[in-house]
Amino acid sequence: MIMLIGRDDLIDAMLTPRERAPAVADIRGELGTGRTSVLRRLQAGFDGQVPVFDLERYDPGHNGQAGANVSVGAAEASYARWVELLSDIAGAMLGVDDLAAIQAAGREGRTHMTEGRTSCLLTSIAELDAPIAPEDHVQAVRAAAAELSREFCEHWGIRQDVGPLLLDNVDVVMDQELGRWLMRLLDEVAKDDRDDTSTVSVVLARTPDHCGGGDAEESETGGGDASGTSGRRFEVHELAPLTAPQVGAFVKEFRGGWPADDIATERRLHEITSGHPATLWLVCDLLYGDAAPGAGEVERMVRDLPARGRQQAALLVEQVLKRSGRRDVLHAVQVAAVPRKFDSTLLRRLMEADGHLVGDVQGLFDDDLPRQSFVERLDEEGEVLRLHEHVRRSVLARLQSTDEERLTRLSGIAASHYGALLRKKHRDGRGQLWAYGTSYLYESPAWQAKIREWLYHSGSLANPGEQREFLLQAARLFLDGFYWWGYYVHFEFCDQLVADLRQLVRQRERPVGSSASTVASLDVRDWPELGRLHAAFVDILAHYPPRSVKTEAADWDRVRNALFTVQQVCGLAGRRRRQLSELQRHVLALLQLLLAHTWRYSSWEDAPQLPQLADRAYEEASRFFGGIPEDEWLLAWVHFERAELTLDRVVSRSTATEEPQLTDVGIADVWALWTSAAEIVQSTAEDEGSQLTGTDVDDATDVSQPSDDDELDEGESDDDEFDDDEPDHELMSHLHRMRADLLAMDGDIEAAAESYGRSVFHAFLFHLVGGAPDEYTMQFYVDVQARAVRFVSRLWSSGERRDAVNAARLAWPAAYAHHRGIERSDDEALERLIERASNETPDPLAEALWPKGPQASELGSYEGPCAKAVNALNMELRYDASHLTDLRA
């Protein structure tokens, strides 16, 4: 039931056509004043056919990053959510053709962003000498968002009369790029020349605390506060508390036409609730609901109603449920306040841990809880519920006040429920730990969601030892995700993790019940390390440049300071290896690896000590990774990166001193490190190869099953598992490419060309490792091709044209030549293609030499031409594992 008193005029104004109706209605009100209820009533006015879009679902997670303050990561995150939001609106409110057009625009925008600035082969070749500046990347993202917005407005403007667009919790995104784009889009909607008589087109709801505009740039471009503009047909509606007469009307409607018992009662209810609608509903439920007191008791109960305060709603809920005799429902409500949302399995675990062993938890979940006015279903199937935030915050405050130990215990159960994936052990066919394949879990949305819930609940820890462990685990999650994906292309998981940490920090800075929405806010102990960890992660995301070629212009000092902060916060500074657990060693090794980057990619011109510092950091990373079976694949990457650094030092030193003899000494060190990396990745690939050929295969551990202590939720499949035996095609490609560079330096053109070909070959196979082609594999394939094309083009430009043609022919394994763009080509045709590549038109040569990579529209799909081509090649390789052992060739 949606009951609104004192809002009738507002509802009527938005449902009734009128002359020069505002295009956008901006509803502002505190939590519990009826913002969402107004939207639901409007929805009901259109027979439920108009959806409500909750912008909490589209939060990019980069609060405060907009305008001049935005980072590449923040812009990328906003774009991903912008595409999702506009596509969802189109799918629900526009036609099928409109949806297809907007989805196509989203793909084209991504293509413009990636192929225009990131995945274009010509750009990648140029980037080898001049890395892309972060501000250029941000501008490309904004251009893509603007193009998508224009496409949406075009289709929205010719829509049929399907009702208003309803947007809830708009405040969540207002200080982010997505918020700026949304307000600009609404500006365009407001300028729409509609009929003289019309209704409101868009209704947005937000809290008064988040209605301010942005910076000066926003105000000038229409990206700021809508209410502060004129002539744009915005109309602001403030949801004020109910007056005493409105409270009386509320009671009368609740009672089915019967007024309050007397004027004194009516005034007392207004006084005790301050006209707050959500609180008044609970009071009416207590006094006039199913378990209403007798006539003689009402006056006493009114007199004894709990006073306004943080616990008022919780006390009212207790009284309502106790009077109805449903203490089991009360217990369920109390434990359900701990998580932000819950399913029946989590509810059962929480109630059992709370000592309430009830038989029909499913009945409570399916029937009793949804009947409460303050409980809502989050999905159509009714498998996920949550308490209204107004009640939830109050219940949490009540639990904190009356039984802090109970709250801490329940928070721990919730954390354990979501953190089970962190404890899983993955083993390969030999029963040994191997973490490369299982690291693809970081790309699973379902796994990400559970880990974020684990982090949220763990934030309530009060014990210093548990807090240190939490900080360490949070650091591992962030650093793993960042090195796995985020240091190369944007990885939204890192953004969302930082957003969650920000919420924990903010809630611990304010009293419970004010605007708090997390369990962590209930612990008032000072925890400054949490804020420092969050700030460090923000700096890393903001200032570490993506892409394979890093620019010296990045603020490497700031990144380095952030990494040192993480090390200090996690208690790892100055610790000796034998004093550390495997988790501590893993985190410290990742920190050393990224610290090496800050020295390696800085300018060496006036700081000759930086290469040595980078090398020492790599050496430390090797030492800490060493001996941890799960981290063996990471140790291979450290060896490879250190080999790259050593080669850069050799080339830099030889150029500076003009003494070529120094090269021979340094090259031996490069080959030694290269071999160390190759031996690790090769041994793993050999075992994978034996399985492919069907020889020497023992019974493998079934990694699709959870460990004994990780029970799956009811009805939940373990889709989040990935194959441990995935070969590391990415590193194998890098190693072949590096060997090609070394052979080219030595003048062995044919061998170098073959190695470049092997590098491209593995980059192509990488498209289906761990899932369908994605932005990472698409970018990597282009970057690897760029290296090979540059090799051929430089031969041509230097006059070695016969070598260039031969190199082009050798730049793909001969046994699989039928997968090339052109299986056979005469010399003249190749010469023309190489000539064009040498004159900034490299794509025709790449399309002739190698299979075509994915287009932006193919990402995430196994049905695209690229995915099918990779799968076809994999089928041919099924009984030929030589491609996994060819680093010895």
Image: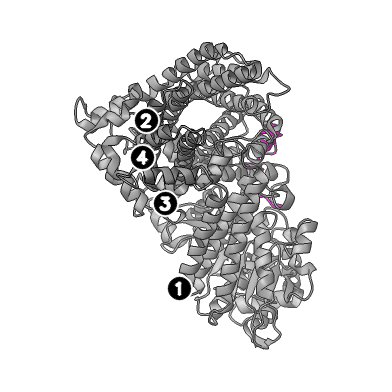
| Amino acid type, callout 2 | Glu
Q: Earlier in the sequence, mark 2 or mark 3?
A: 2
For mark 3, what is the residue? 860
In what element is the residue under mark 4? helix
Q: Which of marks 3 and 4 is nearer the N terminus?
A: 4
Disc 2 to disc 4: CB gap under 8 Å: no
Spatial CA distance of label 3 from label 4 is 15 Å
Q: Is residue 610 above or below residue 718?
A: above
Q: In this view, does 132 lie above or below 327?
A: above
In what element is the residue under mark 3? loop
- Residue 836 visible in this rendered orientation of the protein: yes
- Foreground of the two, 743 or 696: 743
Give the image quarter of residue 778: top left
* Chain part drawn in magenta: 514-535
Is 515 included in the stretch rendered in magenta? yes
Spatial CA distance of label 2 from label 4 is 17 Å
**In the image, residue 853 lies at what x, y percent?**
41, 47
For mark 4, what is the residue? 765
Q: Quadrant of the N terminus?
A: bottom right
Q: Residues within 10 Å of mark 1 (few under 14, many from 20)?
A: few
Q: Earlier in the sequence, mark 1 or mark 4?
A: 1
For mark 1, what is the residue? 97
Is 792 included in the stretch rendered in magenta? no
In what element is the residue under mark 2? helix
- Foreground of the two, 601 or 653: 653
Disc 2 to disc 1: CB gap under 8 Å: no
**In the image, residue 152 lies at what x, y percent?**
57, 69
